Amino acid sequence: MLLQLAELIDMNSTFTNPSSTELKALLENIHTIAVVGLSPKEKRPSHQVAKHMQQYGYRIIPIRPAIDELLGEKAYASIGELDQPVDLVNIFLSPDKLTPVIDSCIKHKIRAIWIQEGIINEAEALRAQQAGITVIMDRCIYKDYCTLVSATRQD
């Protein structure tokens, strides 16, 4: 099945992130973020980023097997177990572990995926885009929030 999907993607395609304007609009219009790979260890980047985004007013839904609760929110073992809608899935997993997450995002009609800074899997990003999902890859949602949204607020 992956080969069939790969054949649908133009082999000359290259992944491109949305523009800064589009990223800012996305960040201003989402409210609930499911974080796949959210670590309970406070010093891990996934924990720090999720905690900061929570402090900025986003609802964080942890996706982490064998954890009941994190950051004051019920944790789920997978995207398929979510019992509530999410606006965006933020992924903190190695590139070789993205395929089942992308499969689940497509199946559950997730509208936007943010693949965290340092994580690059162009084939999976393109596959998600082909399914109609907005995809951001190899960028930090927290850094982009600080640069694009927080810095421009007139509070």
Image (cartoon, rainbow, N blue to C red):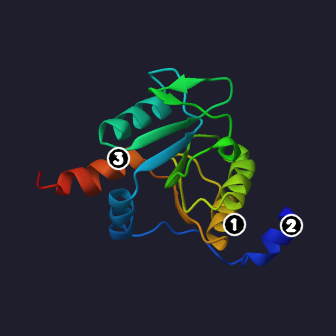
* Residue 49 position (above or below residue 101): above
Q: Nearer the viewer, residue 65 or 93?
A: 65
The circle on residue 3 is 2
User: Which residue, given by chain and number where applicable, does mark 1 sit on?
Assistant: 127
CB atoms of marks 1 and 3 within 8 Å: no
Identity of the residue drawn at 31% across and 36% down: 55
Q: Say which amino acid is labelled 3.
A: Lys
Q: Secondary structure at mark 1?
A: helix
- Image side of residue 96 versus residue 43, left or right: right
Separation (CA) of disc 1 from disc 3: 25 Å
- Image side of residue 4 versus residue 145, left or right: right
Q: Nearer the viewer, residue 127 or 61?
A: 61
Q: Residue furthest front?
A: 83
- Image side of residue 35 versus residue 95, left or right: left
Q: Residue furthest left?
A: 154
* Residue 89 position (above or below residue 37): below
Reading the chain from its start, which is encountered first: label 2 or label 3? 2
Q: Say which amino acid is labelled 2.
A: Leu
Q: Say which amino acid is labelled 1.
A: Arg
* Residue 47 position (above or below residue 122): above
Separation (CA) of disc 2 from disc 1: 11 Å
Reading the chain from its start, which is encountered first: label 1 or label 3? 1
Separation (CA) of disc 2 from disc 3: 35 Å
User: x%, y% of residue 50?
Assistant: 43, 36
Identity of the residue drawn at 58% across and 66% down: 133
User: x%, y% of residue 39?
Assistant: 55, 27
User: x%, y% of residue 79?
Assistant: 65, 45
The circle on residue 143 is 3
The circle on residue 113 is none
Q: Secondary structure at mark 2?
A: helix
Reading the chain from its start, which is encountered first: label 2 or label 1? 2
Identity of the residue drawn at 37% across and 44% down: 58
